[in-house]
Image: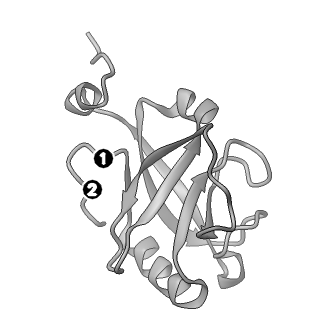
Amino acid sequence: MSEPKPHSRVAVTDAAASLLRTLTAQHGPLMFHQSGGCCDGSAPMCFPVGMFLIGPGDVHLGSLEVGLDEPIEVYISEAQFEYWKYTHLTIDVVPGRGAGFSVEGPTGNRFIIRSRMLVDAELETFGLAPSA
């Protein structure tokens, strides 16, 4: 798995990074938006940059370095972020087909989120009170 930046909210597995490089070659620069429950549950949705418009109600979670010229940016809606602000998200890929509009659909794979709770040092970095 690619190492996250110190105190990053997002990371990517090697398998997902490999698929993202292939998809970027086909579709151009990509971005993720973490779905909030519509369409494909809470799956990370991957789109060509510009196909999904980021608005003022979206939060930038971080950037994924996958071995391309530019990182892949990851966003989440502000409302969904309120539920997930204490978690670190890792984008992974598994066999199967999601029901959404994410670009990996035709490949026979789908992106998923693996999550863990932020540790105290991360909580402090993000301005969240560590657990007592």
Whole-percent x, y for residue 112 in the image: 56, 59
Query: x and y percent of residue 129 in the render?
Result: 30, 16
Q: Quadrant of residue 109?
A: bottom right
Q: Residue at x 60, y 39 (%)?
A: 56
Left or right of 121, for residue 32: right
Whether the residues at callouts 1 and 2 have beta carbons within 8 Å, the answer is yes
How far, Cα to Cα, is label 1 from label 2? 6 Å
Residue that extends furthest to the top in the rendered view of this protein: 132
At a point 75% along the width and 67% down the height, the residue shown is 101
Q: Amino acid at mark 2?
A: Pro
Rendered view: 127 above or below 33: above
Could you say whether the residue bearing mark 2 is in a helix, strand or loop? loop
How far across and down, in percent of the image, does residue 58 sit? 58, 42
**Quadrant housing the N terminus:** bottom left
- Residue projecting furthest to the front: 56
- Which residue is the site of mark 1? 8
Query: Is 82 rendered above or below residue 42?
Result: above
Q: Above or below — where is 18 with respect to 132? A: below
State the colouring used for the structure image: one colour
Residue 4 tag number: 2
The quarter of the picture where residue 17 lies is: bottom left
In the image, taking residue 61 as reference, residue 55 lies left or right, namely: right
In the rendered image, residue 75, in percent from the top left (x then y), is placed at 53, 50
